[in-house]
Image: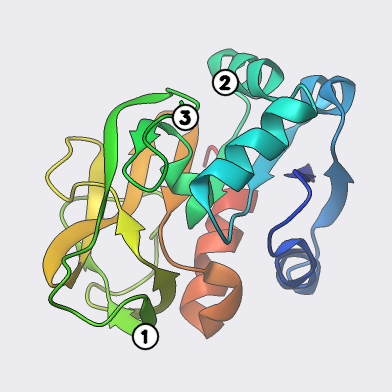
Amino acid sequence: MIVTLVDYGAGNLASVERALERLGAATRRSESPDSIERAEALLLPGVGHFAALIRGLDVRGLREPLRAAIRRGVPFLGICLGLQALYESSEEAPDVPGLNIFDGSVQGLPADVKLPHMGWNRVRQLRESSALRGVPDGAYFYFAHSYAADGADSRVVATSCYGVPFAAVVERENVWAVQFHPEKSAANGAAVLQNFLRFPQ
């Protein structure tokens, strides 16, 4: 399986590529609708601002090809901001519509904690998770974010806590998304990426 990394003009593409290549995966970068439509598997990495990611997708005409690929059942993994982009909107840029794969809005983490949430934190599994197969409950992953999806969402299979519980892993059929950075999360992160490469086992 070749993993197509969605290139929207920013993001942590190089570090994700290296992490996948260490696992023996073939990767390619794409910023064209045609290559998104032909993809065997899609990965949307994300760092920075919600509006920059969404506008980067829109200016390249990638919004609808991404949505169509997800509807067709193409395996999809969103990382960090790539998770947040799946929702209808984000408090970070309320006038910019997200990809609307999931309903609901991403909210800011509480103002009474130091932001951004940066560093290692535990991930608690709520139920069986394909993304976290083989990863012990309570394992540590590396986070870097100030906004997050609601930890009570029915699609959330694992949470972390920073001021409030928030979604750490979201899964629905062929769509997986993680708020942490697996490419920076040592062996636990490598396990998540390996599970994605084995999808749909």
Mark 2 or mark 1, which is nearer to you?
Answer: 1
Question: In the picture, residue 4 is in which quadrant?
Answer: top right
Query: Is tag 2's residue or tag 1's residue first in the polypeptide sequence?
Result: 2
- In the picture of the structure, the residue carrying the numbered disc 1 is 120
Q: Which mark is residue 98?
A: 3
Q: Residue at x 84, y 52 (%)?
A: 27
Query: Going by the image, does 20 lie left or right of 146?
Result: right
Compared with 50, 68 (above or below) is above
Comparing 84 with 68, the one in front is 84
Q: Give the mark, 3 or 2, whose residue is nearer the N terminus.
A: 2
The three-letter amino acid code for the residue at tag 1 is Trp
Residue under label 2: 73
Say whether marks 3 and 2 touch (CB < 8 Å): no
Identified by mark 3, the residue type is Gly
- Report x, y in % for residue 100: 42, 22
Residue visible at 30% across and 81% down in the picture = 121
Q: Residue at x 25, y 36 (%)?
A: 155
Q: Is 40 drawn above or below residue 161 in the view shown?
A: above
Calculate the distance from the C-alpha at mark 2 to the C-alpha at mark 1: 32 Å
Q: Which residue corresponds to the image point at 54% horizontal and 14% vertical from the top-left?
A: 71
- Which of the 4 image quadrants contains residue 36? top right
